[in-house]
Image (cartoon, grey):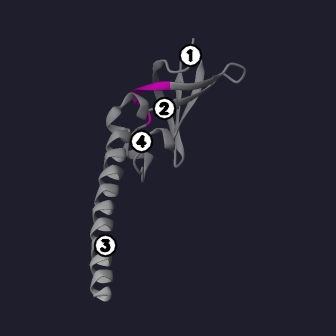
Amino acid sequence: MYDKNNKIIVKITNITPYGAFCRAGKADGLIHISEVSDYFVKDIKDFFDIGDEIEVEVLDFNTVRKHLKLSYKNCHSELLKNDDKEIQEIKTAFQNLNKKQDKTDNIENISKTNKNE
């Protein structure tokens, strides 16, 4: 019924500073603020209004309590940080750092050579 990773439509029933409560059929759910976007979310009300029907991904379903843990960002790729981009930026930063280290090593070698002469 509510299998992990499935996409479902829910209706927002309440909004708090830490998340949005919603209803899907006979189950209640929560979209925690950390599951709205990988980027900083100042106010969750910037994303949802009470009564909105939105697509979310099921992270977990407690069959006893009939409670859903949901993710909004997993259905909206623009809200996910691109790890490839971050890795590329880090790689470039290290390349620049290595170039600076090479220049420093060359200056030290020249300095040592001048002292020995």
Q: CA distance from mark 2 to mark 1?
A: 13 Å
The amino acid type, in three-letter code, at marker 1 is Asp
Instruction: Classify residue 101 as left or right of residue 16.
Output: left
Q: Are marks 4 and 1 in contact (CB under 8 Å)?
A: no
> What residue occupies the far right of the structure in this picture?
64
Rate crowding at label 2 as few (under 14), some (14 to 19) or many (20 or more) other CA atoms within 10 Å: many
Instruction: Confirm whether the magenta stretch covers residue 97.
Output: no
> What residue occupies the far front of the structure in this picture?
117
Q: In what element is the residue under mark 4?
A: loop
Q: Quadrant of residue 74?
A: top left
* Label number found at residue 104: 3
* Label number found at residue 3: 1
* Label number found at residue 71: 2
Q: In what element is the residue under mark 2?
A: strand
Q: Quadrant of residue 93?
A: bottom left
What's drawn in magenta, residue-wise? Answer: 50-57
Q: Earlier in the sequence, mark 3 or mark 2?
A: 2
Q: Are marks 1 and 3 in contact (CB under 8 Å)?
A: no
Q: Nearer the viewer, mark 4 or mark 3?
A: 3
Q: CA distance from mark 4 to mark 3?
A: 42 Å
Instruction: Classify residue 56 as left or right of residue 117.
Output: right
Question: Where residue 97 sits in the image (x, y, percent)?
Answer: 33, 62
The amino acid type, in three-letter code, at marker 4 is Ser
Question: Where residue 115 sits in the image (x, y, percent)?
Answer: 31, 88
Rate crowding at label 4 as few (under 14), some (14 to 19) or many (20 or more) other CA atoms within 10 Å: many
Q: Earlier in the sequence, mark 4 or mark 3?
A: 4
Q: Nearer the viewer, mark 1 or mark 3?
A: 3
